[in-house]
Image (cartoon, helix red, strand yellow):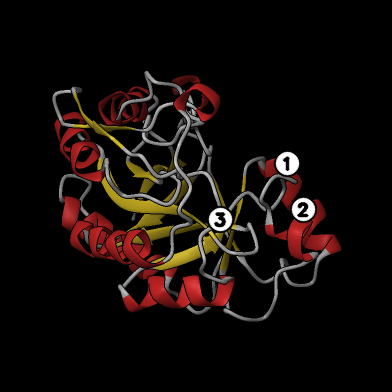
Amino acid sequence: MAKFYYDLHMHSCLSPCADDDMTPTAAAGMAALNGLSIAALTDHNSCGNLPAFFAACRAYGVVPIAGMELETAEAVHVVCLFPELSDAMAFWQVVRENYMMPFKNDAAVFGGQFYMNEEDEVIGTEEILLITSTMLSLDEGVRLVREHGGFAFPAHIDRPSNGIMEILGDIPPEPGFTFAEFNDSENVAAYREKYASVAPLGILVNSDAHRLTDVNEAENCVELDADPSDETAVRDAFFAFLRKNDAAKI
């Protein structure tokens, strides 16, 4: 077994609330600089910068995970991770074509939404505002993630902004989450004690980085039986770990 340090919740400059210098390549580079083994890009309601992120992670020796931070109709943020880049891109297209609210982005108000290539060049902008609720309910959104082979967990449950606890008051039994995300590991014990729904869940501590200085240091890890040099083996082992029924704390 080997330790793999991770950050599974990072944004790029496609998310309007992220810094413009948080490019997919820069995010991957910071993950490598901080000693991370596994990193996921999870832009708001979009997977558009994942191809550039994957290329950059491979160049830096970081195992990339395809992701999205989905905002449900209830305004709950959910981190969605996929074993295959193609599955994430297919999921995004379904969300984009069927469930996005038809609001235009005002870059002067919300910030730019930039699509990047692996050379760190802007190749386009997203016109639809990404930081808004989709038309998917929590149950519908998680079901759609699973239909595309993905894994979902509620984001930053220890934060009031778009956290499931603040919005719904607790983690409901459906859609059957087995993990939850914290921004601050020091909050875990108190939440486990206060909420019976949190006590049995596996815990992931991620940065929700919107700027380069927010990316996790090499502190939170998973132990996997995989060759660190084999990207596919690491990713397969990681998702097998997530899907364990016992949802052991990490």
* Residue 194 lies in quadrant: bottom right
Q: Residues within 10 Å of mark 3 (few under 14, many from 20)?
A: many
Q: CA distance from mark 3 to mark 2?
A: 30 Å
Residue shown at the point (30%, 23%) measured from the top left: 26
Mark 1 and 2 residues: CB-CB less than 8 Å, in contact?
A: yes
Q: Nearer the viewer, mark 3 or mark 2?
A: 3
Residue shown at the point (70%, 69%) measured from the top left: 171
Residue shown at the point (51%, 31%) measured from the top left: 17
Disc 1 target residue: 186
Q: CA distance from mark 1 to mark 2?
A: 7 Å
Q: Residues within 10 Å of mark 1 (few under 14, many from 20)?
A: few
**Which amino acid type is shown beneath numbered disc 2?**
Ala
Residue situated furthest right in the rendering: 194
**Which amino acid type is shown beneath numbered disc 3?**
Ser
Q: Residues within 10 Å of mark 2 (few under 14, many from 20)?
A: few
User: Is disc 1 placed on a helix, strand or loop?
Assistant: helix
**Which amino acid type is shown beneath numbered disc 1?**
Glu
Q: Nearer the viewer, mark 3 or mark 1?
A: 3
The C terminus, quarter of image = bottom right
Q: Is residue 118 left or right of residue 194?
A: left
Which numbered disc covers residue 189?
A: 2
